[in-house]
Image (cartoon, rainbow, N blue to C red):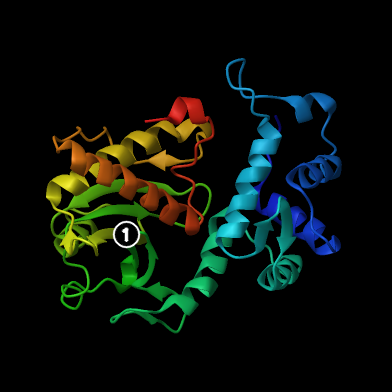
Amino acid sequence: MRKFKGVELRFQILSLLEKSKSGLTPTELTDKLADIFKLTREEREEVYSKRVHDKVFYKRVASEEQRLKNVGLEIFSNNVHQITEKGIEALQELKTRVFNDKDFFEHFFISEIKKQIVSKGISIDKEGKPHYANIREGNCTMYIVPRDKFKRNIDVDLIKYPALYILIDSFGDKTECYIGCTGNPIERISTHKSKSRGIDFWKYALIIEFYNKSSDNHFDKSDVEYLEHLAIKLAKKCQLDKQKKISNAKGADEPYIKEHAKKEMDEAFEDVKRLISKVGLTIFDNINKKETEL
């Protein structure tokens, strides 16, 4: 299968949806894209392997459709894809400005995150970059912390409980990431930022804390260690397209936690995956579901 640039696919998807008054079904949209890119019959029918019969191009298109939906550029309802008002505006911008895969989601994600300033200590700087914006999903809150805005002395009251964290260099398709957990998020991120003991590549830290309202309880260190184990294990299994770089040298050992707690953590990890997908990251994308099951 030939390679397609993500931005090129997204532009064509939005263009087709804008032209369609009533929207397009997944099959209609994918077939029209195949015509635009002049795919041969063999390329249209190509599957991942003899064991996995998902069609490569159809899966690629579905992944891009999901990302567009995550940032509000399209909606999917009653088995029909439709462009949103925000998607129409984005399409006009794509016609006049050249985006690469690295900055596409960062650009449109930042415009969306400006609407989600809901907690103290969160601000948008003059350049439009988010500082401690957050997104909730279930019992999880994910803080988006730009490296250049991180201030150790002002953040101790905002992010202070055990957390899973992911360091990334961008919100694009080919992001590099490092996954970890900590009982003290501010100290750990400060260490990762330091010149002597830090990690160089990252530009954003995604810090995910957990709070169960029904039990009025935050997760403890062993809980987030288990989530770290799940996250690294899945991310490494999802490195099938060689575009994702997981900087962790090895996986995290599975810690012992009680069965009832493990069930709660497994549910929380589903929330984590949804949060990561919402910001356009693909590190947990199941290209081959059977091979990436935990």
Residue 201 in view of the camera? no
85 relative position to 273: left or right = right
Residue found at x 48% / y 78%: 114
Number of numbered tags placed on the structure image = 1
Residue 77 at what x, y percent from top left?
68, 57
Residue tagged by mark 1? 140
Residue found at the very far front of the displayed protein: 214
Residue 78 at what x, y percent from top left?
70, 54
In this view, 195 is above or below 293: below
Residue 17 in view of the camera? yes
Quarter of the rendering containing residue 165: bottom left
253 relative position to 281: left or right = left
Residue 218 at what x, y percent from top left?
18, 60
34 relative position to 93: left or right = right
Residue 33 at what x, y percent from top left?
80, 45
In this view, 254 is above or below 108: above
Residue found at x 52% / y 54%: 172
Residue found at x 21% / y 68%: 159
Quarter of the rendering containing residue 10: bottom right
Q: Amino acid at mark 1?
A: Cys
264 relative position to 278: left or right = left
Position of the N terminus, as image quadrant, is top right
In this view, 33 is above or below 11: above
Which of the two residues, 198 or 166, is positioned nearer the viewer here? 166
Q: Residues within 10 Å of mark 1 (few under 14, many from 20)?
A: some
Residue found at x 42% / y 30%: 293
Which of the two residues, 65 or 206, is positioned nearer the viewer here? 65
In this view, 161 is above or below 35: below
Q: Secondary structure at mark 1?
A: strand
